[in-house]
Image (cartoon, rainbow, N blue to C red):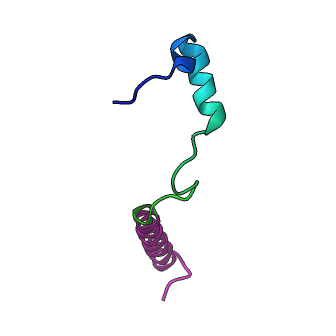
Amino acid sequence: MRRKTAYCRDQSTATRYAVVFARRPVVARRGLVPGPRVFGSVAAVGLAWIGVVSTWRDGLALLTDGGL
């Protein structure tokens, strides 16, 4: 456990919070880029959507006058 310094011990909780984050603001470790699993999931959903739309479009074309 960290030992409190005299500087932090004399101040209120709100002031200590402000002092801590003024020295070192919170930043995500990887920045704003999501993990690789997110990209894989988005790609899988995109491919599934392309498959559904193309199947629907081809089925619609076969059922109307534009079919074979």
The residue located at (62%, 23%) in the rendering is: 18
Count of all numbered marks drawn on residues in the image: 0
Q: Is residue 54 magenta?
A: yes
Q: Would you say 21 lies left or right of 61 here? A: right
Q: Tell me where residue 13 appears, x and y as whole percent.
A: 53, 14
- Toward the viewer: 5 or 67? 5
The residue located at (51%, 14%) in the rendering is: 9
Q: Which quarter shows the N terminus?
A: top left
Q: Is residue 3 magenta?
A: no
Q: Tell me where residue 29 appears, x and y as whole percent.
A: 51, 53
- Toward the viewer: 33 or 5? 5
The residue located at (47%, 66%) in the rendering is: 39
User: In the rendered image of this protein, does residue 8 appear above or below residue 48?
Assistant: above
- Toward the viewer: 65 or 51? 51
Q: Based on the displayed image, in which of its 4 quarters is residue 56 positioned?
A: bottom left
Q: Based on the displayed image, in which of its 4 quarters is residue 35 positioned?
A: bottom left
Does the magenta stretch mainly form a helix, a strand or a loop? helix
The residue located at (48%, 68%) in the rendering is: 46
Segment tinted magenta in the rendering: 39-68
Q: Tell me where residue 33 appears, x and y as whole percent.
A: 55, 59
